[in-house]
Image: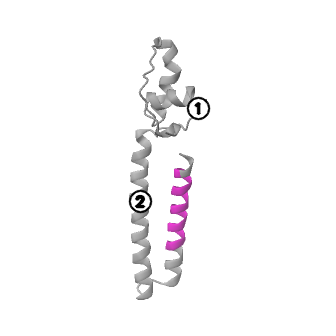
Amino acid sequence: MTKSKEKKDVPISFRLTKSEYEPYKDILEKTDLSKTEFFRGVFLQKQYTFNVQECKPVEYNKLIFIFNKTSNNINQIAKRLNAENKEGIITQRSYNIAINELITIQSQLKRILDAC
């Protein structure tokens, strides 16, 4: 049997004080690893760096939702402007001004979102 195919039948366990566990607790909360996977990586593979998934604050998700809705509205306005421009309802000058304003709004929203 290869090492990865071997049955893991020897249990190893140890206890830590709360203060000893505290640094690991923070890391475990930020990774998607179980305690077993984490400590196996540390002790067997001498892996000391792990991919940490920083959680975005709740406000971030709300902002994403609002920005998505705003982007959808901008697209609807642009579609209507294009249709009315083709039908001759609005002038080319008015069309260009409106489209440029929409592009400016979209750029500002993207810049704000990228800063988060």
Q: Residue at the location (39% across, 70% down)? A: 76
Of residues 87 and 56, the one drawn nearer to the viewer in this rendering: 56
Picture disc at residue 82: none
Q: Residues within 10 Å of mark 1 (few under 14, many from 20)?
A: few
Q: Does the magenta run of residues contain 100?
A: yes
For the point 43% across and 23% down, which residue is it? Answer: 10
Residue 70: mark in rendering: 2
Q: Calculate the distance from the C-alpha at mark 2 to the C-alpha at mark 1.
A: 48 Å
Residue 20: within the magenta?
no
Q: Quadrant of residue 15?
A: top left
Going by the image, does 111 lie left or right of 32?
A: right
- Name the one closer to the observer, 53 or 70: 53
> Which one is nearer the viewer's eye here, 37 or 73?
37
Task: Identify which residue is drawn at 42% across, 41% down.
Answer: 59
- Asked if residue 109 is positioned above or below residue 96 in the image, the reply reads above
Q: Where does the magenta region start and end?
A: 98-113
In terms of secondary structure, what is the magenta stretch mainly?
helix
Q: Residue at x 53, y 67 (%)?
A: 103
Instruction: Kindly state the secondary structure of the residue where label 2 is placed.
Output: helix
Q: Secondary structure at mark 1?
A: loop
Which of 7 and 106 lies nearest the eye of the viewer?
7
Answer yes or no: is residue 72 visible. Answer: yes
Residue 111 against residue 31 in the figure, above or below: below
Whether residue 27 appears in this view of the structure is no
Callout 2 touching callout 1 (CB < 8 Å): no
> At which x and y percent is residue 100?
54, 71
Quarter location, residue 82: bottom left
Q: Name which of mark 2 and mark 1 comes first in the sequence.
A: 1
Residue kind at label 1, given as amino acid type: Gln
Asked if residue 88 is positioned above or below residue 17 in the image, the reply reads: below
**Residue denoted by label 1:** 45
